């Protein structure tokens, strides 16, 4: 894949995002279809096939920036492109991701699963790499893809998958604010180092959760979903309490332990594992934060309810493939 990731672009070609931290590929009229397939698949980390390349004589640009386990991809061109992520490719997905697709310029259509989304400037939707997709962009376009591991998104917003393939525009105040944020990220992300960029992407997920949760009043969700949301909010507020346990959570929320387990069973993650994952995620955020650079790993672990440093280090390594000290060191490079 190396050949597909080579090439350079001037700042003018990249638009508002500079080339300093982006890998770019300009597609000219002589580019082969295989070159398109290879590059777009490499940039998005998922298998795509370009069924219809650009219009003759036109060009396109794809560029990306990786920020730890997330990636932002900017894809622009003069139109006439149709990309397929078919059922076979969806089944072969090695890493399941949920992505925010923001349309800055142009219009088109996205088919995902059994839904069809009309794309227009200033709107966004959510996609799931485990579902087949067809992306049709008939005219001049610029799109931004915010690609996150599914588990990272669900740890912040457990109902994110309900919104896959739902179009969102500026029809609601918070939606307009979130869309402005996406546009701002496109303009400024390249000016930050990885630690700051990761903080911005964390904020993006927090804003997504806040924005879409505000729409729940207009949607029919089940009492169990509402109960799960309340339970997770309670747990979030108590993550720093090392004495937090399942019995306390059930008692404080007026339910029995058996029902507590039943509510979480639908998420595919047990109560205990969800608490552990959220605590580890908060430790990771603190290790990333420049403002907490003077705080020791032990202090951060204790702050989020880990009293056994050996257990914490092993759990952190299992979750993020690096020990906490090595993770902090690499995040500062």
Image: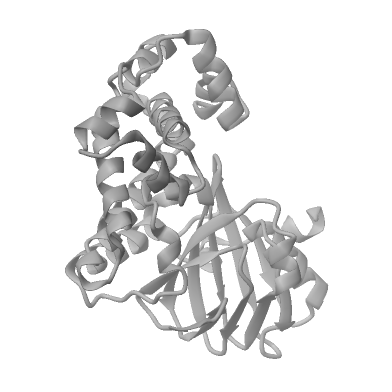
- Where 247 sits versus 212, above or below? above
The percent position of residue 108, horizontal first and vertical second, equals 50, 86
**Quadrant of the frame with the C terminus:** top right
Residue 13 in view (yes/no): yes
Q: Say which residue appears at 24% left-offset and 37% top-offset.
A: 234
Q: Is residue 214 left or right of residue 143?
A: left
How many numbered dots are placed on residues in this image? 0
Q: Please state which of residues 9 and 95 is positioned toward the viewer in this rendering.
A: 95
Q: In what quadrant of the picture does the N terminus appear? A: bottom right
For this view, does 310 lie left or right of residue 200? right
**Residue found at x 44% / y 49%:** 154
Q: Position of residue 299 (x, y in %)?
A: 36, 11
Q: Residue at x 30, y 36 (%)?
A: 256
Q: Give the camera-side residue of 167 and 294.
A: 167
> Relative to residue 184, is residue 78 depicted above or below?
below
Residue closer to the observer: 18 or 82: 82
Q: Residue at x 57, y 76 (%)?
A: 113
Is residue 192 visible in the rendered image? The answer is no
Q: x, y percentage for residue 127? A: 51, 67
Coloration mode:
one colour
Name the side, left or right, on which 154 lies relative to 3: left
Q: Quadrant of residue 162?
A: bottom left
Q: Position of residue 322 (x, y in %)?
A: 60, 25
């Amino acid at each position: 894949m190396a050949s597909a990731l080579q090439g350079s672009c001037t700042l003018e070609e990249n638009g508002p995002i500079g080339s300093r931290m982006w890998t770019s590929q300009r597609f000219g009229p002589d580019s082969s279809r295989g070159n398109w397939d290879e590059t777009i698949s490499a940039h998005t980390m998922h298998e795509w096939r370009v069924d219809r390349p650009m219009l003759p004589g036109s060009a396109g640009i794809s560029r990306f920036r990786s920020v730890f386990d997330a990636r932002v991809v900017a894809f622009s061109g003069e139109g006439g492109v149709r990309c397929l992520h078919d059922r076979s490719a969806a089944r072969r997905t090695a890493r399941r991701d949920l992505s925010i697709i923001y349309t800055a310029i142009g219009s088109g259509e996205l088919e995902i699963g059994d839904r069809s989304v009309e794309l227009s400037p200033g709107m966004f939707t959510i996609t799931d790499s485990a579902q087949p997709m067809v992306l049709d962009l008939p005219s001049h376009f610029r799109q931004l893809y915010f690609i996150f591991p599914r588990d990272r998104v669900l740890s912040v917003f457990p109902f994110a998958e309900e919104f896959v393939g739902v179009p969102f525009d500026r029809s609601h105040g918070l939606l307009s604010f979130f869309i402005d944020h996406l546009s701002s990220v496109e303009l400024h992300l390249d000016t930050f180092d990885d630690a700051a960029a990761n903080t911005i992407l964390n904020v993006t997920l927090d804003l997504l959760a806040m924005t879409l949760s505000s729409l729940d009043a207009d949607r029919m969700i089940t009492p169990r979903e509402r109960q799960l949301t309340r339970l997770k909010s309670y747990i979030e507020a108590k993550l720093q309490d090392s004495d937090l346990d399942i019995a306390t959570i059930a008692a404080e929320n007026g339910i029995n332990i058996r029902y507590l387990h039943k509510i979480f069973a639908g998420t595919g993650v047990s109560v205990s594992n969800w608490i552990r994952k959220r605590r580890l995620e908060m430790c990771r955020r603190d290790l990333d934060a420049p403002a907490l650079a003077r705080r020791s790993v032990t202090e951060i672990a204790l702050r989020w309810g880990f009293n056994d440093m050996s257990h914490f280090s092993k759990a952190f390594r299992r979750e993020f493939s690096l020990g906490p000290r090595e993770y902090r060191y690499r995040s500062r490079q």
